[in-house]
Image (spheres, rainbow, N blue to C red):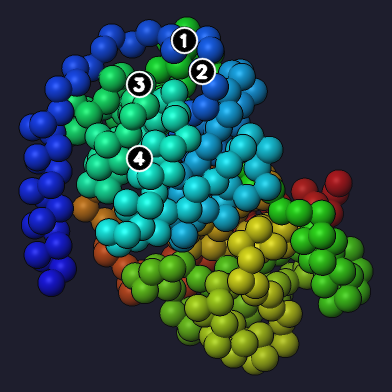
Amino acid sequence: MKKLEIFLKGIVFRLMILLSRRRVAKVKPVPANFEKVLFVRLNRIGDALVTTPLIKYLSENFNFEIHILADRKNFFAFKNNPAVDKIIVFQKGIKGIMETLKQINKRQYDCIVDMHDDVSTTVSYFIASSNAKYKFALEKENHKLFTHTIKKLDPSEHHVVERNLELIKLFNPKAEVSEKNIAIYPTEEELDKVERIIEKNFNKPRFFAGINISAGNVARFWSVERYEQLIQFFLQYDINLILLSSPADVETLDYLSDKYEVHSFFTKSFTEFSAMISKLDFLFTPDTSTVHLASAFKIPMFGLYVKYNTDNVIWYPYQTEYEAIVTEEPNFNNLSFEEVITKLKPFLERKHEEYSNS
C-alpha cells in the first residue's frame, strides 16, 4: 500500500510540473506593500526550529503578517513566538489537504514561501493551487511552480540554518543578515514550574548537567547499558544531574532514574521541556530536536550523530559551543562508551571548571 501511495504521489508531482506555466523570475525585491505571507514547514520538530532564525529576521525587517503552515508534529515549535501572527495546522489525508488549501486561499496571501530544503508532493500541491501572486523557494526539482527561487547553498559546507536564511534574499537581494539563532519561547508559567522542580529536588547551586536519552529514532538510541555507564561517569563529579526523555521513553527513563537515584524529567509539552533545557549548564544528547534547544539557550552540548551515506553537514547546535562524536555507520551499535568518554571527559571538565571559577 505504501509503495502504491509513493507511486501515485510521483505521478501527481510530475503532472503539477508539466501543467505549471510559471517561469522563474529573476531575483528582485518584493513589493513594499505585502500584507500577509504564508511560510510552509511540515514534518518534524527540528525541521520547524531551524526555520525560526529566518522568521525572526523577516519579522524584524519587514512589516507584513507572518503566518505558518505547520504539521501537527511540529506546530508547537512556533507557539508563543512573537514573530508569528498565526499558525495553521495541517492535518493529513485528502480531507485535511482540501481544508488546508481552502484556508490558504481564503486568507488571500500576497506570497507563499516553501521553507523545505527538498521537494514535498503535498507542499507542491499547495503551492500550485494557491492563489498567491508570489511564490518563493530554494531552487529544486519543482522550481517551475514558483515565481522566484534562489540557489541552495551547498549542504556539504553549510548548516541547514544558513541554507534557510538564503530565502531572505528573495525578499531583498541586498539584505545583510547578522547572526541569527534558533528561537523557542516557553511561557513564564512553564519557566516558573521547572524552577520550582529544580529548587525542590536539588539542594544547592551546583553545575547542572542534563542527559537526554531520547532520539526519536531507534538507530540513534545509544542502549540502556551505555546510558548506565554514562550516568555513573557523570556522578563522579560534584554536579547536579537530571535525566531527560520524551514521553515515548519514559519507562527507560524511570528505570535509570530509580536505579541510580537520579532525578528525571519528562513532559508532553515541548515548550515546557525547552524550559527545563534552558536551566542547564551542560547537555548530553543524541541528534534530535533537543540539539536545537541547546542552540536557542546557548547551552554547551555534547552530541552523538549518525552521518550515514551523506556528505551533508550534521545539524550541530548553531552558534553554540559543542563537541560531538559522529559515526558514519547507520546506527550507534558499534559506538563504544570508551570512544565517547575520551572526547566527552575533557569537554565536560573544562565547562565544569569554568562554572566553578565564574
Distance from the alpha carbon under mark 4 to that under mark 2: 22 Å
Give the mark toward the camera: 3 or 4: 3
Crowding at dot 1, Cα within 10 Å, few <14 / some 14-19 / many 20+, comes out as few
Q: Residue at x 32, y 51 (%)?
A: 98
Give the mark, 4 or 2, whose residue is nearer the N terminus.
Answer: 2
Residue type for callout 4 = His
Residue drawn at point x = 55 percent, y = 32 percent: 66
The answer for how far apart the CA atoms under marks 1 and 4 are is: 23 Å
Foreground mark, 4 or 2, reads 2
Q: Residue at x 25, y 34 (%)?
A: 128
> Along the line of sight, which residue is nearer the eye, 119 or 198?
119
What's the residue type where badge 3 is placed? Lys
Q: Is residue 167 above or below residue 33?
A: below
Q: Which residue is mark 3?
A: 133
The answer for how far apart the CA atoms under marks 1 and 3 are is: 11 Å
Relative to 353, residue 209 above or below: below
Q: Earlier in the sequence, mark 2 or mark 3?
A: 2
- Front residue of 209/56: it is 56
Residue named by callout 2: 34
Q: Secondary structure at mark 1?
A: loop
Give residue 74's position: percent from left, percent from top: 49, 55
Q: Secondary structure at mark 3?
A: loop
At mark 4, the secondary structure is loop
| Contact flag, marks 3 and 4 (Cβ < 8 Å) | no
Q: Is residue 92 above or below residue 70?
A: below
Disc marking residue 145: none
Marks 2 and 1 close (CB-CB < 8 Å)? yes
| Lower sequence index among marks 3 and 4 | 4
Residue 186, image x, y percentages? 71, 53
Which amino acid lies under the numbered mark 1 shown in the image of this protein? Pro
Mark 1 or 3, nearer chain start: 1
